[in-house]
Amino acid sequence: MQRAMTPIASPCIRVCVLDSRTDLCIGCGRRRAEIAGWRGYDDAERDRVMAELPERLRLMTSRAVRGRTKREVSPPGQTS
């Protein structure tokens, strides 16, 4: 008798681009090694990584915004 396979929880949103400065995926926030090893991780390890992702993504976003000029960050039609 075959067991039904349960899907592995993944934060992947199919925006797979690694930031060259941080080696983090800009879509999900995982490191290259975490992406490569994801299927081999047990539930506890995946949960640990997933708990860190919101903060990683927040930091990446804030760094990206800080690195831009005011003109690039301002809404269209508005300059500061």
Image (spheres, grey):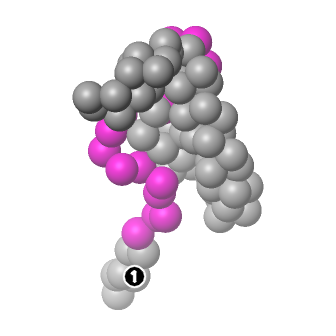
Please, which residue is most extreme toward the bottom here? 1
**Front one among 46 and 26:** 26
Q: Position of residue 38 (x, y in %)?
A: 54, 46
Q: Main secondary structure of the magenta part?
A: loop
Q: Please tell me whether residue 47 is drawn above or below residue 55 in the rendered image.
A: below
**Front one among 71 and 45:** 71
Residue in view at x 55 percent, y 34 percent: 61
Q: Is residue 20 magenta?
A: yes
Name which residue type carries label 1: Arg
Read off the magenta span. 7-25
Q: Position of residue 44 (x, y in %)?
A: 72, 62
Left or right side of 17 for 47: right
Query: Is residue 14 visible to us here?
Result: yes
Left or right side of 79 for 23: right
Element marked by disc 1: loop
Residue in view at x 41 percent, y 69 percent: 7
Q: Please tell me whether residue 52 is drawn above or below residue 75 in the rendered image.
A: below
- Quarter holding the N terminus is bottom left
Q: Position of residue 29 (x, y in %)?
A: 55, 39
Badge 1: how crowded within 10 Å, few (<14), some, or many (20+)? few
**Front one among 60 and 78:** 78
Q: Is residue 41 magenta?
A: no
Residue in view at x 36 percent, y 81 percent: 4
Q: Please tell me whether residue 53 is drawn above or below residue 43 in the rendered image.
A: above
Tell me the quarter of the picture where residue 5 sits.
Answer: bottom left
Would you name the residue on which mark 1 appears?
3
Q: Position of residue 27 (x, y in %)?
A: 42, 40
Query: Is residue 45 visible to us here?
Result: no
Tell me the quarter of the picture where residue 62 sits.
Answer: top right
